[in-house]
Image (spheres, rainbow, N blue to C red):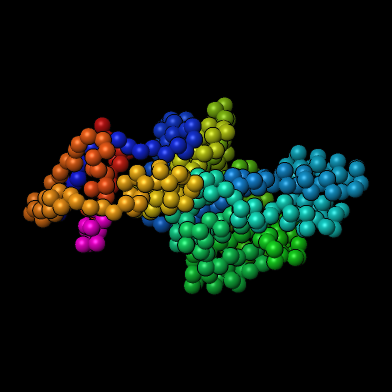
Amino acid sequence: MVKLLYLNKEMWVKDMGNITFSEIMEFYPAHNYSVYEELKDACQRGCLIPFVGAGLSVFCGYKGWPDVLKLLAKYIYDGSVRADVEKKIEDGELLQAAQDIKDNYPRMLKELKNLIDYDMIKNCDNDRLYASAAYVLPYLFNNSFAMTTNFDRVLEEVYDRCHVKFGNVITPYDPDLLTQARQVNPHCLFKLHGDIGPEVYDIKRLVFTQAQYGESYADNSPLMQELPQWFQNKKLLFLGCSLEMDRTMEVLQQVMTKNPGLDHYAILSCKPDDVQKRCIEMGDLGISAIYYPDGEYEAVRVILERLLEDTNYTSYEELNRHARKSASIPPTAHRFMYDSGYTAFVGREKEFDELQEFCKDSMQVSWWAVTGPGGMGKSRLVYEFTNKQKEAGWEIIWLKQNDYRD
């Protein structure tokens, strides 16, 4: 038995920036819409693994990897060596540049820890945190494996705040733990390059230099024997990654080729003139990307939030409710939100009784329109009534604008 409530109301729209979901899709319309539908299907089937790059950490002040290396290079005393390292950074030879910095500056780990300060995310402004793309991840992937190339602890902090703490945080030097987690508790975070925090004192616990990368990701290493097991029937969603062809991508390609026939996905910034070229490059890597205009980085949050809305509307509501209540919204704005719980719900017994009778009607499909002037309490009435129906065992589905087709 299906009962539909039609609510005649003005939509409340969050200010997520200057770009909308429709504008993102229209940047490359036929392609973006098609990839989004595939991404939505993969998310609904629970076969997506988020792969998070540095782009999802910049909101709280962390720098991209080339900028970190440039700052570290300044500590090299020998001018000619320093200039050579800076040239390698400009040419994209980042692992070799990191190797040269380590070889020429023994205090590198201390300075690296200063740059990737754990307190930076701890002290991040709430409004920036709750508006970030990273904050959607615990709602969208709340019981699954996640991967990151980042040294920072943004993901750990965000998941902790959303009460879905990772069962384990695993580094390349813990292949046995990776195996155990796969078998027992797949809700864990794998940090491909290692972890930096107050308790990390040994540069050998990181994958930072050319030599360390070669050692950790050699074809016959324990890690490379284990990783393909995690990718069985799983698809990667690359977020905050440039996806330029570097050693990390080479490793992922090796892993992905051991599980053939699977597409992977990305959300990528791109200039209009480069879309054709990037699309071909991504196709060669087995990656289908949703492209958005270069510089419109809030597009990642917009897409992830729409994906959550389309695949798990209950979690989508929870995300919005939690973000509104936790961010610095003035109390006077809070109290007028229909789902804030700021004031008790009283009255409306007659309307409640009528809606109850409507739900008891024996017709298989029927609908009821709740209409009236703005501010009369339509949203609050439907919100309170559907919550009661959930308690009684009903499944509640909120239809959204994009559910309708002309």
Q: Nearer the viewer, residue 380 or 254?
A: 380
Q: Is residue 396 visible in the rendered structure shown here?
A: no
* Residue plotted at (68% across, 61% down): 197
Query: Residue 230 placed where, x, y %?
Result: 52, 62
Provide residue 212's location: percent of width, then percent of height: 74, 59
Residue 284 image offset from top left, x and y in percent: 56, 42
Q: Quadrant of the N terminus?
A: bottom left
- Residue 354 visible in rendering: yes
Q: Main secondary structure of the magenta part?
A: helix
Which residue sits at x=35%, y=51%?
A: 342
| Residue 190: quadrant of the picture | bottom right
Q: Quadrant of the C terminus?
A: top left
Name above or below for residue 227 compared with residue 340: below
Q: Is residue 89 magenta?
A: no
Residue 389 in magenta?
Answer: yes
Residue stretch in magenta: 386-394
